[in-house]
Image (tube, rainbow, N blue to C red):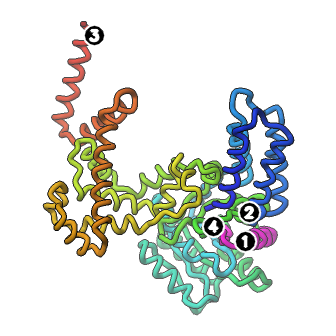
């Protein structure tokens, strides 16, 4: 996402590396390309004008730090302005202290509202809420059935009544939620191809009968300025509480994400970053600014890892890697754990340092699929004894996995490289080696019995006392 803007900002920062200091002249020169890139990315013209003005003023003002290089100064200023442009951060939902919290989703047809309703329900369910989805879109063919299928996939009930009007459906659903103990109700309302009087009257009637606590506008980020303009119209006619952007993973320009908060005055609450039901993130402007600058987003990556990766398996894999007992079966498990995190490109883009090295390059997801196929075509003996895989075995594995012998060789080389890298980490002198050995010790200790842990602690305490006496 945001490849167009990221590339232009990177070019500007590199241009400042040769400068002794920031001046009016070189700031203006550097911001020219950024201005063009922002406009090409379909960012609102007024937003671009204000952004360039603020960066320019702060870059040559008294806020400049004399102790850092020009490109570092400009990066910090741009990051702060991007954060301010998309912020402040407000991903939280104000839940009702009594009765169900009612969230009303509105938006144009085709913006991904129904899928987002299910994603939001799934996210809230994981956070301990008990949601009820409401199929109030009786305009679009199969919208009700789509929500039922999505609800079933995440084990969240769906209320529907195809004989009633949308306002009546929503009111009845709220009554049912109160009676059956659902503490969160998500209303999936109908959209239109454009904002018209019948649509607004229907939404106003739903608001009157269902009394939603929160009204969120769902907008397709890939439509750029059109999404921003429609959001401005919705905000002018309904009292919005926040915005949700869908399809952000496919948006190379980023115009909607950068403009929509400034135009509507409403915070972006959540973003859709993929097709899977788990592909929804709370929106944090400072993290998004980091991604735009190619600096990654390690906080979101860690949060996703904690949520999606099996902690016991991850610790067992780590122990085996450091112990040098890591087999090809474990290598396969590590692939499966990575795939739980989402698309490989999205995972890599959140890693600081590596994300900036991509520079718009596509990450070949098929390599991971091929690697899994290669390992799955091996016998249990071969996975445990990769050194025994000779030429004839490699030929058979390649044929069984639908790959080539070169692919088999590459998987085996990657496996050996990972083992060697981890050995270097634990054997390394200095702080990095100490950290690796400490982590290994911590993981090993967790796998011990309580009696063994007590003995280990007693032994450590005895060594400490002995050291003090000396």
Q: Earlier in the sequence, mark 3 or mark 1?
A: 1
Instruction: Please tell me whether residue 363 belongs to the stretch shown in magenta.
Output: no
Q: Is residue 400 above or below residue 196?
A: above
Residue sticking out furthest to the top: 470
* Image spot of residue 359 (x, y percent): 58, 56
* Image spot of residue 116 (x, y percent): 56, 71
State the mark number for residue 60: none
Check disc 4 and report the residue beneath it: 251
Which region of the structure is painted magenta?
Answer: 216-237
Look at the image and tell me whether residue 300 can be seen: yes
* Image spot of residue 388 (x, y percent): 14, 57
Quadrant (top left, top right, bottom left, bottom right) of the N terminus: bottom right
Image side of residue 69 versus residue 380, left or right = right
| Mark 2 vs mark 1, CA separation in Å | 8 Å
Q: 145 or 133, which is in the foreground?
A: 145
Check disc 1 and report the residue beneath it: 227
Q: Is residue 97 above or below residue 299?
A: below
Q: Earlier in the sequence, mark 2 or mark 4?
A: 4
Quadrant (top left, top right, bottom left, bottom right) of the C terminus: top left
| Mark 2 vs mark 4, CA separation in Å | 14 Å
Check disc 2 and report the residue beneath it: 260
Q: Picture quarter containing residue 168?
A: bottom right
Q: Nearer the viewer, mark 4 or mark 3?
A: 4
């Amino acid at each position: 996402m945001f490849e167009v803007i990221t590339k232009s900002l990177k070019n500007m920062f590199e241009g400042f590396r040769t400068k002794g200091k920031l001046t009016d002249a070189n700031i203006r020169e550097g911001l020219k390309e950024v201005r063009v890139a922002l406009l090409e990315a379909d960012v609102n013209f007024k937003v671009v004008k204000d952004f360039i003005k603020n960066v320019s003023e702060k870059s040559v003002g008294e806020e400049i730090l004399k102790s850092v290089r020009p490109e570092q100064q400009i990066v910090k200023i741009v990051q702060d302005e991007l954060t301010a442009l998309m912020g402040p951060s407000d991903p939280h939902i104000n839940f009702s202290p009594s009765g169900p919290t009612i969230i009303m989703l509105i938006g144009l047809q085709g913006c991904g509202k129904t899928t987002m309703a299910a994603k939001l329900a799934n996210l809230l369910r994981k956070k301990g809420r008990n949601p009820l989805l409401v199929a109030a879109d009786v305009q679009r063919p199969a919208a009700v059935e789509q929500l039922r299928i999505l609800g079933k996939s995440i084990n969240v009930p769906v209320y529907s009544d195809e004989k009633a009007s949308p306002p009546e459906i929503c009111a009845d659903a709220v009554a049912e939620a109160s009676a059956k103990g659902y503490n969160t109700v998500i209303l999936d309302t109908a959209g239109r191809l454009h904002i018209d009087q019948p649509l607004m009257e229907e939404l106003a009637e739903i608001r009157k009968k269902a009394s939603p606590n929160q009204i969120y506008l769902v907008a397709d980020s890939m439509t750029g300025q059109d999404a921003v303009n429609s959001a401005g119209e919705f905000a002018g006619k309904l009292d919005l509480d926040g915005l949700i952007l869908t399809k952000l993973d496919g948006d190379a320009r980023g115009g909607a994400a950068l403009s929509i908060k400034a135009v509507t005055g409403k915070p972006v609450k959540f973003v859709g970053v993929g097709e899977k039901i788990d592909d929804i993130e709370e929106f944090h402007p400072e993290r998004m600014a980091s991604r735009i600058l190619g600096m990654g987003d390690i906080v979101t990556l860690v949060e996703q890892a904690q949520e999606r990766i099996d902690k016991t398996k991850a610790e067992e894999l780590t122990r085996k890697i450091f112990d040098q007992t890591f087999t090809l079966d474990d290598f396969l498990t590590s692939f499966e754990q990575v795939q739980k995190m989402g698309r490989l490109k999205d995972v890599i883009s959140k890693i600081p340092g590596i994300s900036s090295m991509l520079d718009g390059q596509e990450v070949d997801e098929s390599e991971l699929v091929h690697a899994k196929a290669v390992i799955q075509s091996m016998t249990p003996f071969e996975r445990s004894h990769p050194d025994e895989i000779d030429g004839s075995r490699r030929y058979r594995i390649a044929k069984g996995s639908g790959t080539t012998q070169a692919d088999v060789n590459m998987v085996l080389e990657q496996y050996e490289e990972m083992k060697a890298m981890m050995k270097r980490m634990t054997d390394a002198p200095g702080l990095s080696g100490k950290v690796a050995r400490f982590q290994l010790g911590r993981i090993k200790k967790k796998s011990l019995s309580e009696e063994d842990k007590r003995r280990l602690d007693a032994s450590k305490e005895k060594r400490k006392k002995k050291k003090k006496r000396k």
